[in-house]
Image: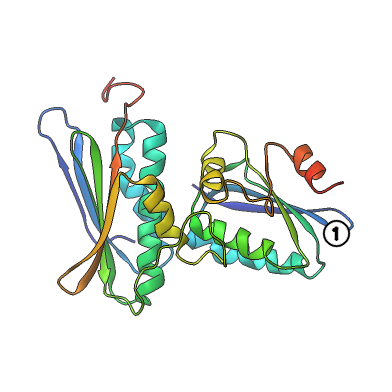
Amino acid sequence: MESKILVEEWGAGLWLLVLAGEHDLSTANRFEQTLAEIERSGTDVIMDFSEATFIDSSTLRAVIRHAEKPSERVVVVAPPGAPPRRLFNLVMPSDSRIPVCDTREDALRALGR
Amino acid sequence: MGCSVLRGSDGVSGRVMRVEERFPLEAASVPLARRLVEAFRPQMAAEAFGLLRLVVSELVANCVQHSRGRGTVAVEAARSDLHVHVAVRCPKGVSAPQVVSPGSRGGGGGLGLAIVDAVAADWGIGEDGSCSLVWAHIAIGEPESPPGN
């Protein structure tokens, strides 16, 4: 299945990344490059996995590395029951640094916006 | 692109029992390896099949990352009554696979095998001649409808 990354600037210092389709080692470089491009503005990032049908540790690593940067805040959107949500729950069951939300509205609230 | 494909059925129901293929040691082989095990989708519970795809993805990615692009990665999956048994072989790498706990951080190194450890019924690391071997057993579960219906 084709993989897509949609990037939208939602406002001052706020970005939305939508990952659709399947994401693994073969797409990780593109994802990391996208994160590096928006990092220059230093910022809050909502990563929406609602349309992702598959992710593995390559994608998770990129999310974790980005969230570990002091200037960046990351919130993940992943619907309950979907494969990405199960993987986030497995890897980050009680991680408050990368909140995992059901919807984009929840993600905005988690960022205090 | 795969080098060869082997498929075996049980000779009665036509149910696929075993698939095997070699892929180049490159990132593009990861989704191809997931496609190889699509043959087991009708035989497994949906969540179990998702775990099979995840494990295959992690094991092939692990080979690609540790073998520096030399040779091929061989992926084999065979079913028994209760499990699909996955074996991934590649040239011995320059660094041994590491495992970290799924909840730990630090850039995520070793995360792939930690995920395999968390979702597989059993798994292990070994050697097969000049190759590294990582294997895992994934529980089949109850498919939503019997194969062929």
Q: Specify the farthest residue to the left.
A: B11
Residue at left offset 27%, top offset 75%:
B92
Residue beneath disc 1: A13
Q: Where is residue A32, by image quadrant?
A: bottom right
Mark 1 Cα shell of 10 Å, populated few (<14), some (14-19), many (≥20) = some
The quadrant of the image that shows the N terminus of chain B is bottom left
Q: Position of residue B57 (x, y in %)?
A: 40, 54
Q: Is residue A51 left or right of residue B74?
A: right
Query: Could you tell whether B100 is left or right of A49 in the image?
Result: left
| Chain letter for the residue marked with disc 1 in the picture | A
Amino acid tagged 1? Gly
- Residue A83, position in %: x, y? 51, 40
Q: Residue at x 57, y 41 (%)?
A: A85
* Mark 1, secondary structure of its residue: loop
Spot occupied by residue B20 in the image (x, y as percentages of width and height): 22, 53
Q: Is residue B10 left or right of residue A50?
A: left
Q: Is residue B116 visible?
A: yes
The C terminus of chain B lies in which quarter of the figure? top left
Above or below, A3 relative to A31: above
Q: How is the image coloured?
A: rainbow
User: Which image quadrant is residue A51 in?
Assistant: top right
Which of A29 and A2 lies nearest the eye of the viewer? Answer: A29
Q: Is residue B135 visible?
A: no
Q: Residue at x 68, y 36 (%)?
A: A102
- In this rendering, is residue A38 above or below B47? below
Can you give x and y, in whole percent of width and height, for residue B84 in the image? Answer: 25, 42
Q: Pick whichever, B40 or B94, lies toward us.
A: B94
